[in-house]
Amino acid sequence: MALREYCCKNCGIFEIIQKINEEDLKVCPTCNGPIDKMLSLPARPIFSGNGFYETDYKSKTKKEA
């Protein structure tokens, strides 16, 4: 299952859970208006704990100091 984001011209942005092999929606399920599929990026994992360096994820404020 995949969480997909769409943007309706009338309703705005909405998310829907679909099977991966399912076709993209062509019309809004609420108002039957035209929609566009939005590209969303997956969340990036942050590794912390033993074995990872603190310099791997330094913020700009720490770099300046």
Image (cartoon, rainbow, N blue to C red):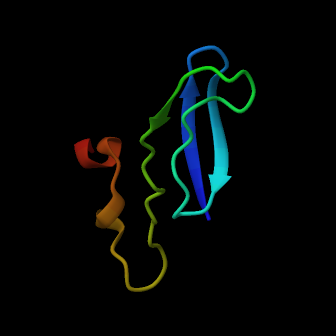
Could you tell me which residue is drawn at 75 percent across and 27 percent down? 30
The image shows residue 10 at horizontal and vertical percentages of 63, 14
Q: Nearer the viewer, residue 3 or 55?
A: 3
Residue at 63 percent across and 56 percent down: it is: 18
Tally of numbered discs: 0
Furthest toward the bottom, the residue is 51
Give 47 or 28, whichever is nearer the viewer: 28
Quadrant placement of the C terminus: top left
Is 11 in front, or is 54? 11
Of the pair 14 and 43, the residue shown nearer to us: 14
- Residue pushed farthest left? 64
- Please state if 24 lies on the left or on the right of 61 as rendered: right
Q: Horizontally, is 2 left or right of 30 in the view?
A: left
Residue 27 vs 18, above or below: the answer is above
Give the residue furthest to the right: 30
Along the horizontal axis of the image, is 54 left or right of 50?
left
Q: In which quarter of the image is residue 5?
A: top right
